[in-house]
Image: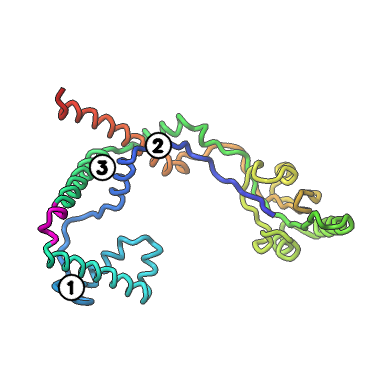
Amino acid sequence: MKIINKRGKKMKKMAIILIIASLVLTACNKKEGGVKTKDESNVIMVIGNENLTESELQEKIDTLPAQYKEYSKSEKGRAALIEEISVRKMLKQEAVKTGIENTESYKKDLEGIKEDLLISHVVNKKIVEGVKLTESELKAEYEKNKENFKTPEQIKAAHILINVSDDMTEAEKKDAEKRAEKILTEVTPANFSEMAKKYSEGPTSENGGELGWFDKTSMVKEFADAAFTGVPEKIYGTVVETQFGYHIIYIEDKKEAGYLSFEDVKPSLEKELLNKKRAEEYRAWVEELKKEYIKK
């Protein structure tokens, strides 16, 4: 049986121009600090005229996503990373040896990279680092769009399910209903979890029938109508029939309809508003630059 929990509210989406998105990513990945001196200690291997050191290897590991960092701790992962770095060093030295640096195609590509870096750094300095948000701006935006953060009434519940299916006879369905009614007479809030593990035929039986928090639209109508009229910390008084079978429902807790707090939405709101503000600042800045640099 599928009972899908739909949590949270969809945040209002907005399109951000590509250059801002890429520069934000650049800023996140940017390394802090000054130029590091080469650590020639703990040499792992010598590749041509260069050493591969433990510190260099660690610097590489530090840039990896979390799952790859974990793999790099294994013997195979470490070996693969050393292989990758050593191959790069060999190819770089081979390029220098064969005079690639003096070719016109290399020089042309290098100029293009320099231009991209210059643009990236000036926009990063002016827009990514230069545009900030205050707490008051965020709170004002929260109040302005508070209806977007509205939450419906929710309950936390668990259930015991006795399955029925279309290929069952009427007698078999009646027997399933009787089993559910018998369980209802024996179950209590205190023993509900153990009873669910023992008797429930639903996918949540292993975790004591727990369904977590959900709103009324997340469940089939018969189940939701019963659960939301139930009393917290009580078991619903009758067996509830749905297309999936017979349910014994334990209403654990209830939350009235309300609003997500400012602190709940602050991280996503800050990201959205900051991207919007940066995009606006970028467009305005470009228009100013046009006045300065483009002569009519």
Give the alpha-carbon distance from disc 1 to disc 3, as whole Å. 36 Å
- The reply to whether the magenta stretch includes residue 104 is yes
Give the alpha-carbon distance from disc 1 to disc 2, as whole Å. 46 Å
Question: Residue drawn 80% across and 59% down?
Answer: 183
Residue at image mark 1: 51
Residue at image mark 2: 15
Q: Secondary structure at mark 2?
A: loop
Q: What amino acid is found at the position of numbered circle 2 in the picture?
A: Ala
Q: Is residue 188 above or below residue 91?
A: above
In the picture, the quarter occupied by the N terminus is bottom right
Mark toward the start of the polypeptide (1 vs 3):
1
Figure quadrant of residue 100: bottom left
Q: Secondary structure at mark 1?
A: strand
Question: Residue drawn 15% across and 48% down?
Answer: 111
Can residue 6 be seen here?
A: yes
- List the single residue furthest toward the top: 296
Question: Residue drawn 25% across and 55% down?
Answer: 31
Q: What amino acid is found at the position of numbered circle 1 in the picture?
A: Asn
Using a 10 Å C-alpha cutoff, classify the residue at mark 3 as few (fewer than 14 neighbours), some (14 to 19) or many (20 or more). Answer: few
Mark toward the start of the polypeptide (1 vs 2):
2
Q: Which residues are magenta?
A: 100-107
Mark toward the start of the polypeptide (2 vs 3):
2
Figure quadrant of residue 60: bottom left
- List the single residue furthest toward the left: 102
Residue at image mark 3: 129
